[in-house]
Amino acid sequence: MKDYGSDNKKAVQAKFDAQKLAFAPIMFQAAKALRDFGILEYLLINKKASVETISKDLNISVYGVKVLLEAGLSIELVMLRNNEYILTKTGYFMLSDELTRVNMDFTNDVNYLGFFKLQEAIKNGKPEGLKVFGNWHTVYEGLSELPEKVKESWFGFDHFYSDYAFPELMEIIFTENPENFLDVGGNTGKFSLKATEFNENVKITILDHPGQTKVARENIKLAGLENRVSTIDVNLLDNSIPFPKGFDAIWMSQFLDCFSQEEIIGLLTRAYNALDSEGSLFILETYWDMQKYEASTYSLHATSLYFTAIANGNSQMYHSEDMLKLISKVGFKIYKIHENIGVSHTLIICKK
């Protein structure tokens, strides 16, 4: 594993960065309030404004505007010039960047309350933070029952990254000429439906927990694709249940990161046993060591902790070497690797 990170900053900067972390949850909420109250948008439109003007036009107390904007100075969302506030570049992205909005909503709605239980989750190996929503073993069991706003932010986060990857992926996947896909962990059927749009002949079976396949069936019906896309309900963690055979390709998209390494071995073994000698396994994941930008690695390390505290208590966004070792251990050979797909994905194509 290659070295990562440095410790070259001066002590005064290191201490300041430590204070940023000490107050991070408070400043996060300040940033969200500046966004949600429309203060950042007001500054974008009007270029600059005083506290009193913003208070009057947005119908927020002078006190409320003042404390939020002063916090905004320290988190560099705004600047102060001649008693008027001006939006910074960071403030612009906090307001207008879709990636930032998706990540912030996911952090606030799905993670914020439950992360008080992060240390318990690490000690117990269970998603203790999930209890703020219900008594499920994993978030996937309760996904369809989550509060509407939580569910909206969860799917918004999940789909944002895959939506950017899918158009590019279709060109790659169908050069391998698969005709009959098994979509393991197919969730709401988004990949399967996109694949049928791209290729008019492919047939796909979605394998997932009953809660997800129920939603997938609704989406399949709405698309009028019952004759080409079907579903099978299964407990994916039960290794005594083999994957169905008869498919020339197995697809796993943003799926294996939802499991521990031991569980991944079980899933890959079932995939290996289900494929014939000419079949292909497609694994699409985001690996923190294979990111083009530091911001992507930062986001993936944070997402790993979501798996710890909320999702299942034992999985993460993996280093690519960890995944390659698991693939090899099961008996698969790496056929091709495609990097930098969409926002941050890598596609690994495996053969027996």
Image (cartoon, rainbow, N blue to C red):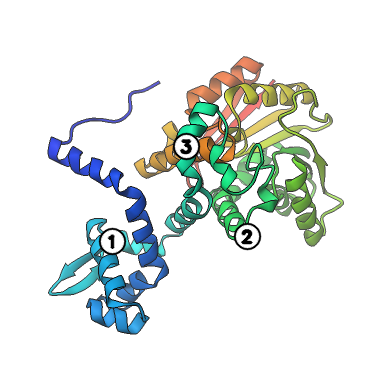
Residue 65 is labelled as none
| Residue plotted at (62% across, 37% down) | 255
Return the x and y of residue 79 as percentages of the image width and height: 20, 65
Mark found first going from the N terminus, 1 or 2: 1
Quarter of the N terminus within the rendering: top left
Residue 111 position within the rendered picture, expressed as x and y whole percent measured from the top left: 50, 48
Asked if the residue at tag 1 contacts the one at tag 3, i.e. Cβ–Cβ closer than 8 Å, the answer is no
User: Is residue 77 positioned above or below 1 on the image?
Assistant: below
> Which callout, 3 or 2, points at the residue further toward the start of the chain?
3
Task: Specify the farthest residue to the right.
Answer: 227
Indicate the quadrant where residue 119 lies.
Answer: top left
Which amino acid lies under the numbered mark 3 shown in the image of this protein? Leu
Q: Is 30 located above or below residue 203 in the figure?
A: below
Where is residue 93 drawn, in percent x and y?
36, 60
Q: How far apart in space, not on screen, are marks 3 and 2 (Cα)? A: 24 Å
> What residue is shown with label 3?
118
Q: Where in the figure is residue 247, as x and y percent of width and height?
A: 80, 33
Identity of the residue drawn at 58% across and 55% down: 150
Label 3: element kind:
helix
Q: Amino acid at mark 2?
A: Glu
Q: Which residue is mark 1?
A: 77
Q: Quadrant of residue 244?
A: top right
Of the residues shown, which amino acid type is indicated by label 1?
Leu
At x 29%, y 79%, the residue is: 54
Quadrant position of the C terminus in the picture: top right
Task: Work out whether residue 190 can be spotted.
Answer: no
Q: Is residue 329 left or right of residue 113?
A: right
For the residues marked 1 and 2, what is the alpha-carbon distance in whole angstroms? 30 Å
Q: What residue is shown with label 2?
A: 148
- Judged from the image, the secondary structure of the residue bearing numbered disc 1 is loop
Crowding near the residue tagged with mark 2, few <14, some 14–19, many ≥20 C-alpha atoms within 10 Å: few
- Asked whether disc 1 touches disc 2, contact meaning CB atoms under 8 Å apart, the reply is no
